[in-house]
Amino acid sequence: MNISIPESLQVFVDLQVGQRGFETSSEYVRELIRMDQDRQNLRSSLLRGAQSADAGAADQSYFEGLRQSVRSRNNA
C-alpha cells in the first residue's frame, strides 16, 4: 500500500518517527492504525455496556467479591 501525504505531514511523521523511537514511517503508521482499532473496540465495548441491563452498584463490597473470586480460582 502506498500513501501520499503533503510535505507538511511528512515532516510531522518524520519527527514522530525520530522522537518516539520508530524505525520507519511505516511502523509509525501501523501503530496509529492499531491505536485507532483499539479506540473503536473500546467505544464499542462502552456502548454495549451502556445498553446492557444495570448490574447494580460497583461499590466496595462488589470489588471485594471480585477479589475473593480471583483468590478462590488461584487457590484451586
Image (cartoon, rainbow, N blue to C red):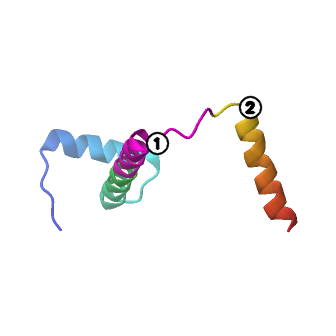
Whole-number angstrom distance, CA of label 1 to CA of label 2: 20 Å
Badge 2: few (under 14), some or many (20 or more) residues near its Cα, within 10 Å?
Answer: few
For this view, does 17 lie left or right of residue 3? right
Relative vertical location of residue 68 with respect to residue 76 in this rendering, above or below: above
Identify the disc placed on residue 60. 2
Magenta region, residue range: 39-57
Query: Residue, x 72% and y 39% (percent of image)?
Result: 63
> Mark 1 or 2 closer to N-term?
1
Q: Amino acid at mark 1?
A: Ala
Q: Which SS does the magenta portion mostly show?
A: helix
Residue where numbered disc 1 is placed:
53
Quadrant occupied by the N terminus:
bottom left
Q: Position of residue 35 (x, y in %)?
A: 38, 50
Q: Nearer the viewer, residue 18 or 52?
A: 52
Q: Nearer the viewer, residue 28 or 41?
A: 41
Q: Nearer the viewer, mark 1 or mark 2?
A: 1
* Quarter-of-image position of residue 27: bottom left
Query: Residue, x 34% and y 42% (percent of image)?
Result: 15
For this view, does 39 lie left or right of residue 74? left
Query: Residue, x 42% and y 48% (percent of image)?
Result: 45
Badge 1: few (under 14), some or many (20 or more) residues near its Cα, within 10 Å?
Answer: few
Q: Amino acid at mark 2?
A: Gln
Q: Position of residue 3 (x, y in %)?
A: 15, 58
Question: Total of numbered circles in the picture?
Answer: 2
Q: Position of residue 18 (x, y in %)?
A: 40, 47
